[in-house]
Each structure stands twice: as structure tokens, then as C-alpha cells.
Amino acid sequence: MTETNERILFLSPTDENGILPRHALEALGAAVEMAAKIPGSTLTVGLWGKQTEGAAASLAGCGAQTCFAVSGDAFGDARYSTDTAAAEALVKKSGATLVVAPATSRVARALPGVASRVGGRIDTRIVGFEADGGKLLVKRWYYRQRMAATLTRTHRPWLLTIDGGVFPAWKGEGAGPAVEAVPIETSSAMTRTKVEGVEAAAGSAQTIRPDADLLFVAGAGWTKKQDDGATHVPEAEKTILEFLERSQASLGGSKSLVEQGGEGGSVLSFMTHLNQVGQTGASPRHPKGLSTCCHGEEPHVVGWRFIAERRAVNKDPGCGWARGKADVLYVADAFEVMAKVNALLGGK
């Protein structure tokens, strides 16, 4: 097998607490795996943020000999000018030929500019890779996860951002790599953009949780007439929000549900297009998924392709979920089932 002498750099900002979030640890796991698969390669780490000491502690056992760090108040906030300056300095300091970073919004905004500054090339949202005789081949989805492509490049440096939920988060033991500070002078022009604060949703209103173990998807059936000939939207809202609060699941919605408000139909007040899962929505990655009052049509199910275990609740035994699209289909009334589930969760 041919040795390549690839110099792999895991590159990531730290969060507001000075540590690496889960998505970054997943990208680190990908970088460690990449270094193991490419003969003759070495692994280095580059971090930036207001503080980096806590993040460096999570690098134990990853195989990197050195951790380069850019730290200081100017690098705590997500800001293009300081993020690109820090990342550029780390790439140049490490002499990296391959750069692996998490595909977060902060990194996605800054890294293309870094690729241009260092004379490199970039490919984003990588979901897998393999090494063929020392040559790196990466995998990426296109056209809303309906087309998969395998890419390779000879140009270096090659920058790659890793999609979340694909690789296991790195958990190592032992001593971490030595940390070497990389000083950067900042100017007033670089820091003129200020972050005044963060306006976050209230805990009960937070419905999108990418790291949740369960994806709960609501279909239009929640807002339709029930067996008594009447709609029960307020009851549906209360039941769903109670379940989300107690289970900390992430909420998804079918296209028909999120769009029926524009058609004059009843809607769930907390459901938006950001929750939409399917062909024209998101394709989230969760260990488990539970669909309720949704018939399991193909445009919706395509968004479930990365869900490991699929279950559904529907009163129609002939719905799409029953035709091999769900591991388990419960033929039952979702109002009754979820009320019972909430009672059981409330008793814990």
C-alpha cells in the first residue's frame, strides 16, 4: 500500500463554554478514522475560540501529536473576519494537506473563504469516505439526498466539512496532545461586527433538537375531524407539546401539515416549515423515529432514510407505513396512544 504523507488537520471552533460540541467531536472521530485508513498520514488539531483549554482535554487518545490553538475574546463570537483569520492561520501553521471540520453554520460560513486564502479546494457536507490504495474518496449526497456521489481530488490542501449524525462522537482516554498557541493580531476593522446577544426560544417552544434520540413526526391527521365528527386541534397541541417536553424528542412535520395553514385549514401553532421532513424538507438523522397521523407517502418517507428504527401510529392498516416503510406499525388512534404515553412518562 502506497504511503501518502498526508497531513490531516482537524479544525473546529469551540462553543461559548470553551469546549467542543457533539458535531465537532463527530468530525474529530472522522479525522481519526481517516488518519488510520490513509497510510503514512499524520493527524494534527487546530482549535479557535475565546477559550480552548477545555476543548483540548477532549482530544485524549486521538493520536494527534500537537494541538494548535488561537484563543482570545475576539475569537469567541461567530464572526466571518475573525473566524477566517483564525482558521487560515491554523491551516498554514499545520501545513495541512487535508482539513476536516464539522459542517456547522459557523464553519460553513468561514471555511470557503479560508480555502481561497490558502489556495485550496473545498467540498462540503461529507457523509462518508474510504481510502483506496492511499487515495482518499469522499461521499456526498446531492438533490436532497436522492443522488450519491463519490469524489476525489489531487489538489492540496483539500478542505472537507463533515455532516452531523454520520460518525460516532470521539471518546478517548489518556493524555491529550501538547497545545501550542498561535498568536494573531486583530484590528478594529476585524472586530467591528459585534454580537449583542442571543435571543433563544423558550424551553417549551424549542421543537427542533438535532441531537435528540427520537424524531417525532406529526401528520395532517392531528388537525382533521376525529371519530366524533369534530376537530381537536387544541388537544392535539397540548398532547404533542407535553410529549416533546417529557421526552425531549425533536419535532418533524409532514408537508401537508405545515402547508395547510396557507390553504385555510387548522394548524398547529408551533409547527413551521423548519420542522418539515421529507422530499422538500429536511432529512434528519436520529436513532429512532415515530410518525403519528401521517400516511407514510413516499415524498415524506424519503426524509426518513437516515432514521435507524422507524415506527408509526395510524388508524389505517393499509397506509403507506404498512407497506414496508416502517419497522412497526401500531393501528390505533394517535390521540389515545400519545395520551397514554404521556401518562407513562409523567409517572417516571
Image (cartoon, grey):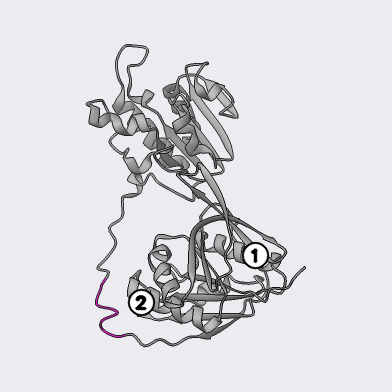
Q: Looking at the image, which is closer to me, 37 or 187?
A: 37
Q: Is residue 113 above or below residue 71?
A: above
In what element is the residue under mark 1? helix
**Residue 207, percent from left and from top:** 38, 44
Q: Nearer the viewer, residue 137 or 261?
A: 137
Residue at the limit of the structure toward the left, as seen here = 264
Left/right placement of residue 234 relative to residue 159 reads left
- Residue that protrudes farthest toward the right in the picture: 1
Asked which quadrant contains residue 218, the reply is: top left
* Farthest-out residue, top: 228
User: In the image, which residues are magenta?
Assistant: 187-194
190 falls in the magenta region: yes
Q: Where in the figure is residue 102, as x and y percent of width and height?
A: 49, 62
In the picture provided, is 186 more to the left or to the right than 327? Answer: left
- Residue drawn at (47%, 24%) of the image: 337
Label of residue 82 in the image = 2
Inspect this view and state whether residue 343 appears: no
Which is nearer the eye, 1 or 332?
1
Residue at horizontal 64 percent and vertical 65 percent from the top: 34
- Disc on the earlier residue, 2 or 1: 1
Q: Give the percent coordinates (x, y) of residue 229.
A: 31, 11
Residue appearing at x 27%, y 58% in the figure: 199
Q: Could you say which disc has been placed on residue 34 in the image? A: 1
Front tag of 2 and 1: 1
Q: Are marks 2 and 1 in contact (CB under 8 Å)?
A: no
- What is the crowding at mark 2: few (fewer than 14 residues within 10 Å), some, or many (at least 20)? many
Predominant SS of the magenta segment: loop
Amino acid type of the residue tagged 2 in the rendering: Thr
